[in-house]
Image: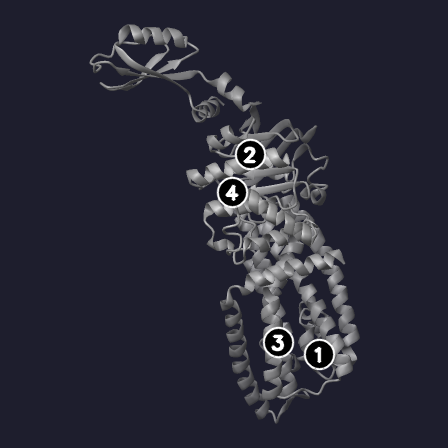
Amino acid sequence: MKKIKYAFTVIRIFMKNQIQDRTNLILDVFNMIARCFIVFLLYAYIFELNGGRINGVDYKTTMWSMFIYFCIMIFNVRRLDNIIMTDVRSGNVEMFMNKPSNYLTISFMNVIGKGIFSFLFISILGSIIMAFAVGVPNLNLPVFIPTFFIVLILGQILGLLVYGIIGLMAFFIQDIRPIHWIVDKIVMILGGSYLPISMFPNFMKLFAFVSPFGAINFASSTVYESWNNEFIIRIVLQLFWIVVFGILLRYVYKKSKEKAMINGG
Amino acid sequence: MNIIEVNNLSKDYKYKVKNKERGFLYNLFNEKEKVVKAVDNISFNVEAGETVAFIGPNGAGKSTTIKMLTGILYPTEGNIKICGCTPIKDRNKLAYNIGTVFGQRSQLLPNLPLTESMEMFGAMYDVNKSAIKNRIEDLSKLFGLEDFIQQPVRKLSLGQRMRAEIATSLIHSPKIIFLDEPTIGLDVVSKKSLRDLLLKINREENVTIFLTSHDTEDIQSICDRCIIINHGKIIIDTATNNLMSEYIKNKNIIITPNVEFNEFPELKEGMEYVQKDTNQINVSVDTEKIDIKDALRELIKTHDIDDINIINESLESIIRSIYEKN
């Protein structure tokens, strides 16, 4: 309880620090509008050409899936590795390595605090606009509502672990941007950034299903009809990957601390 | 009671060296490692409430030592005990007993008032809400933060920010504060005010101060004890006052004439003109070669003097000569 209270205090303060600069929120809103506007127009045309359905999924459901994906991108746990790399390269990591919380926990809270306000603001406002502009998809609400929040939270935890490991690589190789680029593009593709998941060929659907990179964005699959049959196995998969990457992160963090070298010592 | 115990502490850094006579491919597969001893088998103890200056030239190993003491870096060899904790093993426990300030870095949140950063760090150190509030009030009075405590940190001057950094690092009432060049970049007024504050927390809260600085004024005005490190080894560990008395080997005698000086007679061995003007002469006296009284007699004999000043060598030049010797 004490730890949860502490986490909320720190996340709230990081969030306040972030929203003092309102340009971030404005940029996030514009980012969302630009993405949705282009993608929605493009796919409206593609769905029209295909008689309104592709792979058995309609336009409305596909757009909600992409909207959820874009909201997750606004939350932006992907920036975690860059935050760690910047701290390691500047030596600022030392400011947090001698605190009672470990450096990774502080970085997690930092990245959550940075993204949470834009994420909540845009997803709530965006959902209302989506409901009017595109319509509400047919959902099995008793399954959708609890499982959506579970896979969303588990996916973000997994994202923090994956990007945390990439960030810690900065203790060994200094520049982690090439690794970030490769992993990030896989996460984006499997999450449905470029192509909606409903349009994936079968082998890619399978890869998105079983790989940890796809599991980060399982929330964007919750609007599909198949979700009702898949949610248990997807949650199990997310938990499995969280355990695997959690152990890996712990190991890499231990090695990183041993490897730490900071300017002027 | 020793609050810091350091025994045979060493830290090696390894880096890759290329063979300049061989090509890229050879070096790609045959890189050799070079080992640099940043800290070389040092031992010292610090008692609770002491004020210690840990000084040395750039690259001497002082920051590396501080980072090992605070649990940031792993030692290659040796033992450290800070408040009974081994920094690497008991990093969390240690964190509650120490505060750190690194002059070139900031732990404060730039967009928010200082109180928010203090609240965050207070929560990090398990201080409850009402205790944080009281502590912020106390520190605010002690450090004179009232005027700017509600301003966003990015709008503070460097002097104000450093006061804020030190106050924040004391939010959990640590027993020791480690300061790595806390006065770097500050103007003379801000430096003085910061030094006064450090002395105040040492006296009023009995906080042990362990400080590195290149500013001899910091050392002279804050620290009772001075540990000098060079090439990773401790070369001197003594009271700051002893450093002044034991290592002063030069004094300067400044004389002004009754009538203008026109002649500058040759001086005895151990005496040397530093300045030769018609209205003032400055003579450096090596006290190991000639007694100051003899030097004074010699000058009185050879010059028509109106006024005399004898000035001790500054701590800065004493430390410089110690660095140069080693």
- Numbered circle sitting on residue A222: 1
Question: Measuring 78% from the left and 73% from the top, which residue is drawn there?
Answer: A233
Q: Indicate the amino acid at tag 4.
A: Gly
Helix, strand or loop under label 2 = helix
Q: Are marks 4 and 3 in contact (CB under 8 Å)?
A: no
| Percent coordinates x, y for residue B95 in the rendering | 67, 43
Instruction: Give the mark count.
Output: 4
Answer with mark 2 or mark 4, whichever residue precedes in sequence: 4
- In-front residue for pair A190/B56: B56
Query: Mark 1, chain letter?
Result: A
Crowding around mark 1 (Cα neighbors within 10 Å: few <14, some 14 to 19, many 20+) is: many
Spatial CA distance of label 2 from label 4 is: 17 Å
User: Is residue B140 toward the left or the right of residue B190 in the image?
Assistant: right
Spatial CA distance of label 1 from label 4 is: 50 Å
Q: Quadrant of the N terminus of chain B?
A: top right
| Percent coordinates x, y for residue B253 in the rendering | 35, 16
Q: Are marks 3 and 1 in contact (CB under 8 Å)?
A: no
- Numbered circle sitting on residue B103: 4
- Numbered circle sitting on residue A123: 3
Spatial CA distance of label 3 from label 2 is: 53 Å
